[in-house]
Amino acid sequence: MLTVLHAEIIPTIRSFAGGLLTFRHAETGLLSLVVKAQKEAILAARMNGGFSCYVAPLMSTSGLTISLISAFFDDSDEPLIIASLLFADDQHSRDLLELLAYDEFDVYFFDDRSRELMSYHAVVEDGGSCLFNGTEFGLLTYHPETAKVMLTAVRGWFGLRTRADDEAAIRIVFEKALMPDDIFIMDLTIDGNDYRGSTGFSHDSLTRTDPGYFQESDIVAGLRRAFGADQVALNPRRRDTNKEILDVLVVTESHILLVQAKDSPNTETSLARALERKRRASHRQLADALRQVRGAARFLMRQQMADLVVNTQNWDVCTDGRTLIGIVVIKELFDNEGATYLEACGSMAGIVDGMIVMDYPSFCVFAHHFCSQTSFITSLERLIALIRDANAWVWPKDFVMADILARLDDLNQG
């Protein structure tokens, strides 16, 4: 296990939002790979005995350049992907290209909470990518605008890929497990279990047959990056009826965040379901979550002081003067259903002051990047206002990426 043998890398992995991360072994000088990804991608890699790296050719004003798409096939046509842009002035880009030229390397998989879930010694099988067939290309120099164009281009290329592109992909094939792949993780740390409603511990595993508990716990962990332990409550209930009002409540001096999560089992059976069935499940999750947020908002706004109980502790929440924002987190959003999510947010007008729908990976990226109370709430309101004013859907992940690139541009200009 990487975190046991090389504990010094743990802070780097925790600070890394997600994607492909290389590290070089001091004793050998060779590179290994960390894949930090959503649980579905990790399980898909385990099911398939590996994953694929596509070297996408992109035309630029200075000639042919490339970027990487790592694909984890839960669906044969529309797999889960990680896009990795490559730049000439970036050591990480050079390390990735060096790694893919190896015959074999070790790969370690971490989820969004930086938990190591599986690791393998893998062999590299290049089906004929431009790294293998001698095609000449050059890497571009980083610039925020260049990155934006490349990200759009590489996603578009992958969406239009051909059978020949599939055959030319680099296959990372698992050869030998470096740790058991059915581990059970128990968290007994104070920092991980200090929020309202905590039982004092939490547990997890890659395979999840009953997903509700795990996703709620993961969402609380994401919120705790920005909010204090006393501000975040898991499964708050009405004191009069003892009925749970929603999954997670966040209370600050100025805002109340109503967070409702809906997930599906993370099993080989559920992952292999047809895309249309996954789409129908997503629609049901969205409708159920909106109904829950609507009910919680109406209960809270009927009184200036809401009488709640969290676990066994009474909690009196003052609603007067606080802004209510609803956040629905579902398993998956679909690229061609922006109008559906726009309509869902609009349906909550007059019930909450703002509403947003995210899939769980988008929530993780948002919580990782906006990791202070001020930046989280300000950015949340900015995203909601952007959607409302334009009357058009804005993908939360794209919103975060735009903010990251804007900050990098400011640093470059400074």
Image: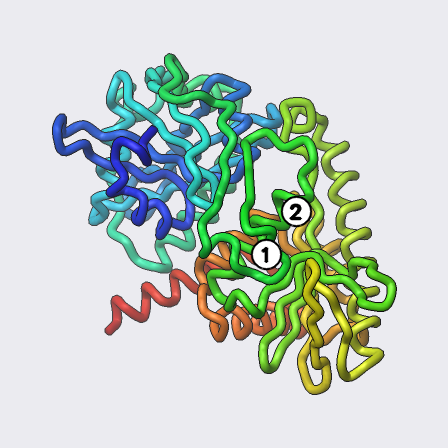
Residue that protrudes farthest toward the bottom in the picture: 321
Residue at 79% x, 66% y is 296
Residue at 31% x, 44% y is 10
Quarter containing the N terminus: top left
Q: Name the residue under label 2.
A: 333
When the figure is inspected, residue 244 is found, relative to residue 207, above or below; the finding is below
Percent coordinates x, y for residue 330 in the rendering: 68, 48
Label total for image: 2
Residue that protrudes farthest toward the front in the picture: 312
The residue lying toward the viewer, choosing from 6 and 401, is 6
Amino acid on which disc 1 is placed = Trp
| Helix, strand or loop status at disc 1 | loop
Quarter containing the C terminus: bottom left
Residue at 55% x, 51% y is 200
Amino acid on which disc 2 is placed = Leu
Question: How many C-alpha atoms fall within 10 Å of the one at disc 2: few (<14), some, or many (≥20)?
Answer: many
When the figure is inspected, residue 391 is found, relative to residue 40, above or below; the finding is below
Q: Between marks 2 and 1, how big is the CA–CA gap?
A: 9 Å
388 left or right, relative to 204: right
When the figure is inspected, residue 296 is found, relative to residue 58, above or below; the finding is below
Percent coordinates x, y for residue 127 in the rendering: 38, 16
The reply to whether callout 2 and callout 1 are in contact (CB within 8 Å) is yes
Earlier sequence position, callout 2 versus callout 1 = 2
Asked whether residue 160 appears in the rendered view, the answer is: no
The residue lying toward the viewer, choosing from 166 and 284, is 284
When the figure is inspected, residue 266 is found, relative to residue 380, above or below; the finding is above
Q: Mark 1 points at which residue?
A: 395
Question: How many C-alpha atoms fall within 10 Å of the one at disc 1: few (<14), some, or many (≥20)?
Answer: some
Residue that protrudes farthest toward the top in the picture: 175
Residue at 14% x, 33% y is 26
